[in-house]
Image (tube, grey):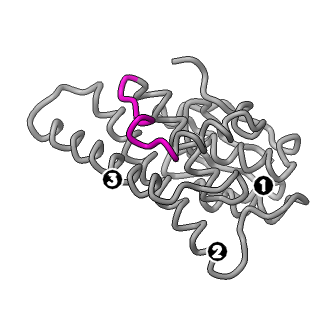
Amino acid sequence: MKLFHSPSSPFVRKVMACALLRGLASRIELVPTNPHTSPEGLLAMNPLSKVPCLATDEGQAIYDSPVICEYLDGLGDAASLYPAGPARIAAKTMEALADGIMDAAVARRMSMGLAQDEGRTAFQSRQQAAVARALDVLEAAPPQGLADIGAVAVACALGYLDFRFGHEPWREAHPKLAAWYSDVSAHPALSRTAPPPA
């Protein structure tokens, strides 16, 4: 399998963390990719020119991170990241919340490099507020361990906030979430996928 890969993408990190947790990392060839330049190899697999994008051994293109993670989960031998029954919906809802944090943070980061006007400032404030509300929800009910896809996604979202918005500390206002993140951060699935120094 080949994974179109950018080490600074929190969504790529989520996929790689899942691959490590499921014992599949050695089966994945990383293809360094800058999606902003729309390289031909990526466009041939994903017309959206977004990473992550997985090319299976059969040549099938799979995107984006929720679909790739679920595909990889079906290949691994370790314990599934998708629990059965109502717990599955809870895990996937937490994944969606964490993906929303990443979406908002990435969008805010991208817009910061552009000329600022009233509309762009309002857009950035809206994204920042969405992240703040999501963190409050997670503080009320933090993940448990790193046992499901929701917890993996939350860890990657928090890691991205530290990576791109380290000047905006979130831990003091969210002590339970901070304690959980401190506990799981040393796990190889996270320590081996951490983004490069900014």
Q: Quadrant of residue 68?
A: bottom right
Q: In the image, is residue 187 part of the stretch drawn in magenta?
A: no
- Foreground of the two, 7 or 184: 184
Residue at the limit of the structure toward the right, as seen here: 77
The percent position of residue 78, horizontal first and vertical second, equals 88, 58
Question: Viewer-proximal residue, 90 or 143?
Answer: 143
Residues marked 2 and 3 touching at CB (< 8 Å)? no
Residue at the image position 87 percent from the left and 49 percent from the top: 23
Describe residue 131's horizontal placement relative to residue 22 as left or right: left
Mark with earlier residue (2, 3): 2
Q: Residues within 10 Å of mark 2 (few under 14, many from 20)?
A: few
In terms of secondary structure, where does tag 1 sit?
Answer: loop
Q: Which circle marks residue 91 in the picture?
A: none
**Residue bearing mark 3:** 133
Give the residue displayed 58% in from the left and 42% down from the top.
Answer: 156
Magenta stretch bounds? 167-176
Residue at numbered disc 2: 87
Q: Is residue 168 magenta?
A: yes
Q: Amino acid at mark 3?
A: Arg
| Residue 115 placement (x, y as % from top left) | 18, 25
Instruction: Report how many numbered discs are placed on residues in the image.
Output: 3
Measured Cα–Cα span from mark 3 to mark 1: 37 Å
Q: Which residue is mark 1?
A: 56
Q: Nearer the viewer, residue 7 or 95?
A: 95
Tag 3 near tag 1, CB within 8 Å: no
User: In the visual, does 114 lie left or right of 182?
Assistant: left
Residue under the point 67% across and 36% down: 185
User: Could you tell me the amino acid type at mark 1?
Assistant: Thr
Q: Amino acid at mark 2?
A: Ala
**Relative to 190, residue 65 above or below:** below
| Label 3 Cα crowd, 10 Å radius (few <14 / some 14-19 / many 20+) | few
Q: Secondary structure at mark 3?
A: helix
